[in-house]
Image (spheres, rainbow, N blue to C red):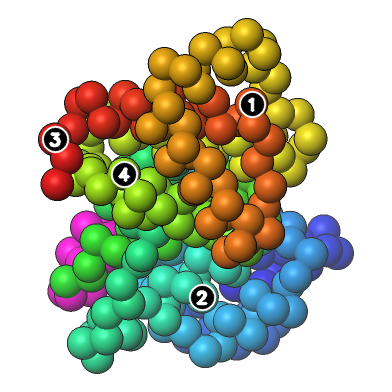
Amino acid sequence: MIVQDDGREKIAIGAGIAFNKKRNDVVSSGKIEKVFVMQENDKFEQLLNIIPEEHFTISEKIISYAERNMETKLNDHIHIVLTDHLSFAIERTREGIHIHNKLLYEIKILYPREFEIGVWAIKHINKKCQIEMPIDEAGFIALHLHTMKPQGGDLRQTIRQTTIIRDMVQLIKRHVRIAVEEDDLSYQRLISHLRFTLTRLGQNELHTMDEEMLVMLKKKFPYSFSYARKIAQDLGRQHGITLPEQELGYIALHIERLMKGIKTT
């Protein structure tokens, strides 16, 4: 709840701290577990007025667990965005409305620690609220945690990047016609590489492959390189992204590894 402390508005957190409290009432320090200053106190107060206190307590438990396990302080905005998201997700689950997370496998690989915390979070929610929240929600929680880390990035941009990676993997599956198991090491390496590729593209810091190496790859793995070229063309049409030929060499290597390790369909 919003409190006055040393003439400043602060946010005090603790189980039952706002129970039967009115404006200007004194808050017992024994019930306060955490105090912090947020620039968006008005938004936070609005949120407190429309969601159950239980949802807020659950969110704070998850945030504390996440900061402890990731060994980092999350942006204070997480107290608004995650609480709002979780409250809506809890109500959806109770009404039998489940949203499928199409990026679940990619999130699991790209942000493993955040995803593990997300899994812990839905188990905690299920126990506290007596519901069965789907595993898809762990992915959504993971994205919120990732983007609230220092230099975690913008949520929309993170979702866009993850979507592009998923589309690239789907293109590879379609062109190469391979059955990929999500827990396969080659698949995980491919997704990690594609993530760094997109990050470097945005920063104009792409790896440069030696020209002789590129020529050798074209000769040694002609099919994989042709697949990489087709994928790049489709990527350009779908997302307006242009991959340099050197980057196609790296993608061709990953495709070759997948083709050798996975039986074709």
Could you give the CA–CA distance between mark 3 and mark 4, rounded to whole angstroms?
A: 11 Å
Of the pair 180 and 219, the residue shown nearer to us? 219
Per the image, label 4 sits on a secondary structure element best described as helix
Of the pair 3 and 117, the residue shown nearer to us? 117
Which residues lie in the magenta part? 121-131
Per the image, label 3 sits on a secondary structure element best described as loop
Q: Which circle marks residue 263 in the picture?
A: 3
Q: Residue at x 26, y 31 (%)?
A: 259
> Which residue is labeled 2 in the image?
84
Q: Amino acid at mark 3?
A: Lys
> Disc 2 vs disc 4: which is toward the camera?
4
Q: Which circle marks residue 176 in the picture?
A: 4
Q: Amino acid at mark 1?
A: Gln
Label 4 packing within 10 angstroms: few (<14), some (14-19), many (20+): many
Res 3 quadrant in image: bottom right
Q: Amino acid at mark 2?
A: Asp
